[in-house]
Each structure stands twice: as structure tokens, then as C-alpha cells.
Amino acid sequence: MMLMDNLLKWMVGTNGNSLTIKMETWSLCSTWGNRIDILHDVGDRIVSFSDTPYVVDGRGFVIQRGEESFAYNTKGQLTKASRNGRYDVEYYYNTRGMIAVRKDNFGNLTQFFYSDLSKPDKVTHIYNNNDGKTTSFLYDDRGFLIFMVVNKEAYYIATDHNGSPLLVFDRKGGEVVKEVHRGPYGHVLFDSNPHFYLPIDFQAGILDPLTGMLHFGEMIYDSLAGQWLTPAGMKFFIMSLVLNICTSTASTRMTPLTSTRRIRTNWVTLIFEFLYFISFWKNLF
């Protein structure tokens, strides 16, 4: 097990957007740091995260992140993610808006099953048609992953208070087979065993191994920049179109699914956002 600690500092603008993130990481062996500069447009949408440019269309959908491109259907669901020469992934959803099938250019056809009627949003089984691998998941009463079976191999999972897996233990010997450290947005900072794929990731979202995106039902979360690919207000946060977790601290839990939202008091802005919401909702349905 690797002992690490992180110190993060934010420089925040007048409208609450993060402008600079400074991160210092140290272990028993070394210390290193990193600085990330973030640029926003007039609509508070990220247009540059460090050296990675973001492109947003008129609906507020992220359609490009660096060399990656994203496409959506009329309901705002992500249907395709691609990167020239690297990968091409397609997504299909069930009637509840949960990811049901994932298909990529490497021959993987992955099916997702939700057989627990008491927790219909929790994936219980994943089957990959390419290698015949079946993965089953067991959750506690809070909906946190505690047990996983990959074919006939069983593992125990230790999560944090938000349901993000931290440690994976082999059931036979009790050895740690995977240890994960994440930043405040959920982006993986350290992975002791990246070849061991754990589908359930930050806050119990479903991790795509190629894009690194997290699926929370119909919403797709980018843990690199700490934002949704589509406006968050449509399904989860009706009162706000802007994800604002920039001032997250250890004592205040402000994460993608539990963060507070800025409600602007300017009436002109409120009316504009209301009209935008109505027009966007019509496009969805």
C-alpha cells in the first residue's frame, strides 16, 4: 500500500469559477507538484483546462475535449465518443435512461444489467461478449459497492463516504489487488493496478475504460475538469445549469452529485436561464 497525501489550492474568480488549481503531492519517497490553469467563456463554461481545449455547442453540450469528439441523441444522451486513431465507442440506453450496451472498435460488446428492483439504478451484472467475462456486483443498504465477482474470482471493496472505491481485496488471501487515490473532482491521481478494471468508480458511477468518463444514468461526468458533458439542470439539478464544485473542502462535501448550486439573483439572468431551460427541454422531448 502506498502512503500519499495531497494539498490543493484554488484561485477563484469573482463569479465563483476556478481559475487556477495548484496541487502538491508527496509520499514517503518524493514530492511533486502541478499547476492547472482553467479558462471559461462568458457563459461560465470551460473552454480550456490546462493544455486541453473544450468545445461547447449552442445547447451547452461538450462536443470536443482535446482530440476527443462526442455525439448525442435528441434526448441529450451520449451516443458516441471517438478519438482519431485511438478509439471509437458507441452507447445504447434502456427505457430508464441507464446505459445498457457499450460497443467499441476493439471488438468489445459490453452489456449492463440492472436486476435489483429495490435499486434499479445500480448495475448488478456486466457481460463482455468478446472475452465471455461476467462481473457481478453486490451493494450495501447505502448503495455502496462491497463485493464483486469476476467469473469465479471474488473481491471485497472498501469505499469512502461517497461510495467511491478505494481498495480492492482478494477474497482468498485478503491481499490488496488495487488501490486508488482521486482528486476532489474524482480524477484518478494514483492507481496501483491499472490493468485491473473496476467498472464502479467515483461516487459509484460507471467508468468507461477508454474515455475515462463516468456514467450516472443519462448524465456523463468528466472527472478531469469536474463538469457534466451536458447541462446538469435537465435531470438532476433543475434550478441550476452550472456545476460549481470549485470550493470543495475536506469539511464540506461538495461533489458532483451532492454539491451546492449557485442561484443567481439577477432577474435578467434568471429569466434567460428559464427560457433556455424551456427551449432545451423541448429539444429533449
Image: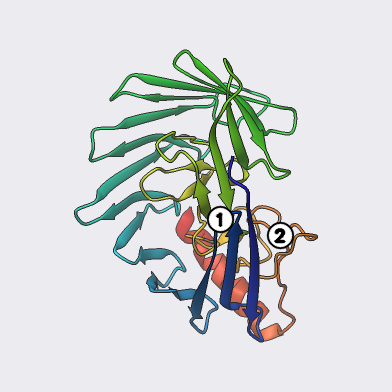
> What residue lies at 61% left-to-right and 40% top-to-bottom?
166
Q: Amino acid at mark 2?
A: Met
266, above or below 262, in the image: below
Image coordinates of residue 214 in percent, x first then y, are 50, 48
Q: Residue 4 vs residue 248: left or right?
A: left
Q: Quadrant of the N terminus?
A: top right
Q: Secondary structure at mark 1?
A: loop
Query: To which quarter of the image does residue 126 belong?
Result: top left
Q: Mark 1 = which residue?
A: 29
Q: Amino acid at mark 1?
A: Cys
Are there few (<14), some (14-19), or many (20+) residues within 10 Å of tag 2? Answer: some
**Nearer-the-camera pick, 225 or 193:** 193
25, above or below 14, in the image: above
| Alpha-carbon span between mark 2 and mark 1 | 31 Å
Q: Secondary structure at mark 2?
A: loop
> What residue lies at 71% left-to-right and 72% top-to-bottom?
262
> What residue lies at 46% left-to-right and 38% top-to-bottom?
193
173, above or below 58, in the image: above
